[in-house]
Image (cartoon, rainbow, N blue to C red):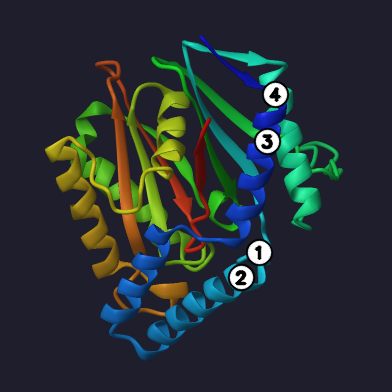
Amino acid sequence: MKTVKSGEITAAVKNLAMSASCDLEPDILDKLLAARDREESPLAKNALEILVANANIASREQIPVCQDTGIGVVFVSLGQEVTVEGNLEEAIQEGIRAGYDEGYLRKSVCDPVTRKNTGTNVPAVVHYEIVAGSSLRIGFLPKGCGSENMSGLVMLPPSAGMEGVEEYVFRKVRDAGSNPCPPVVVGVGLGGTFEKAALLAKKSLMRPLGKANPDKTVAEFEQKLLQRLNREGQGVMGWGGVNTALAVHVETYPTHIASLPVAVNIQCHAHRHKEIVL
């Protein structure tokens, strides 16, 4: 058995929270540069230049790449051979609280009824899974709500087929317009149940940008959706061009014979995500 102390977890999550807000991962920077190089609209190309310059300034000056530093979404994969010394949930929440405090990050979490701000940006939303092995993997996704609010879920009849899935995803992204600050990353959860589809869509955003689903049929569907969005979508910030989306990630799960759940979770161009293995 391997023991991980709660203090180590808190320190790791604190660093994830601060770095995620200021330093975009290479996968998103590469996609933004590629989008800029292929863009046909002068207005959209100029916007992409500004987005890349903004990301570089944020990293250099260690200031948030966007003023909306999001609500924390944490994915925890806990190895069966790992023992946590202390309270895992409390360690994660304390790490986020400390990171948002020390990093001078905007605190946006509030009570859904009274709308009173918690003042700490916690609690974060934490998802746990038990896996084989002796490591503890923590992924952090600060989710801004300009994009989160454009997400959706539908329970399609199985007769809708993949054509119906494609149409729903396309409409959600197209109708979102400029609200999620495109070019976007589109996470799609297909199958399972109501709540499983939503979790699949969110979790798909942690996949390296543009990495295809290992299932060939699903990977082809991802490319089909991406091409249609960039052909018929509204472009960078809704200003036209050929870059409505940087990537489409689809995750699937077996479902009931009478059901076809589809969830779409949209992410903005500032696709902030970090991961660490303890």
Pointer 3 residue = 124
Q: Is residue 99 left or right of residue 19?
A: right
Does the rendering let one see residue 41? Answer: yes
**Residue found at x 28% / y 18%:** 258
Q: Nearer the viewer, mark 1 or mark 4?
A: 4
Sequence-earlier tag: 3 or 1: 1
In the rendered view, does 27 fall on the left or right side of 213? right
Q: Where in the figure is residue 241, as x and y percent of width and height? A: 32, 79
Q: Residues within 10 Å of mark 3 (few under 14, many from 20)?
A: many
Give me the C-alpha separation between circle 1 and circle 2: 6 Å
Looking at the picture, tell me which residue is in the foreground, 90 or 177.
90
Three-letter amino acid code of the residue under disc 4: Ser
Contact, mark 2 vs mark 4 (Cβ under 8 Å):
no
233 relative to 157, above or below? below
Q: Are marks 1 and 4 in contact (CB under 8 Å)?
A: no
Nearer the viewer's eye, disc 3 or disc 4?
4
How far apart are labels 3 and 1 at the CA level? 18 Å
Mark closer to the chain start, 3 or 4? 4
Mark 3 near mark 4, Cβ–Cβ under 8 Å?
A: no
Q: CA distance from mark 3 to mark 4?
A: 17 Å
Q: Which residue is mark 4?
A: 6
> Can you identify the residue that label 2 sits on?
58
Q: Give the amino acid at mark 2.
A: Ala
In the rendered image, which residue does mark 1 sit on?
A: 64
Q: Residue furthest bottom?
A: 42
